[in-house]
Image (cartoon, helix red, strand yellow):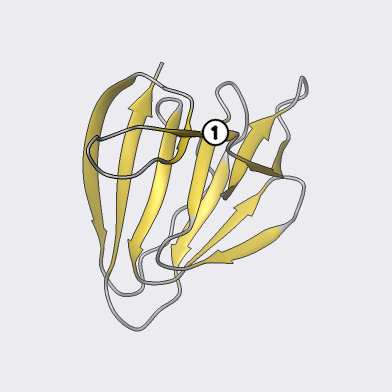
Amino acid sequence: MEYMRIVGDDEGVTRFEDTQFATKSADYAPPAPPIDVSGHTTATGMLVLRFPIGWSSDWHPAPKRQWMIIVSGRFEIEVSDGEKRTLGAGAMALLDEAGSKGHKFRLVSDQPGSVLVVETE
């Protein structure tokens, strides 16, 4: 299962990294059959963000190390090395950019969008 990570370097420049979860087969919820399961990450909070049509931001880092899962809408995200990506429902990104310039984020769909945020340590 793939996801995108946004990281900042020593100069504060952000970039995308494409990566994936390492999984292994496990009896996660017996008596259901085994499924592929990733390692465990501790979450410190969760919230849902709702974006109105036309919403956009200037440069900002995520307030905490967090997972961003697009629930609805299409968003464009730009990192400070100049790369842009468009993300739709089901896309996952790990924002690991503390101390950097951060990213720009804007809703590009013609309907409101929503994002599930899971804060981690």
Is the residue 81 above or below the residue 44 in the image? below
Please report the residue visible at 22 percent of the width from the left and 47 percent of the height from the top.
Answer: 48
Q: Does 100 sit left or right of 119 as displayed?
A: right
Please report the residue visible at 46 percent of the width from the left and 26 percent of the height from the top.
Answer: 65
For this orientation, the residue located farthest to the bottom is 110
The percent coordinates of residue 15 (x first, y second) are 72, 42
If the image is split into quadrants, where does the C terminus sit? top left
Please report the residue visible at 62 percent of the width from the left and 39 percent of the height from the top.
Answer: 6
| Of 74 and 52, the residue lying toward us | 74
The percent coordinates of residue 93 (x first, y second) are 51, 45
Q: Quadrant of residue 43?
A: top left
Is the residue 24 above or below the residue 80 in the image? above
At mark 1, the secondary structure is strand
Q: Amino acid at mark 1?
A: Lys
Q: Residues within 10 Å of mark 1 (few under 14, many from 20)?
A: few
Task: Report which residue position mark 1 lands on.
Answer: 24
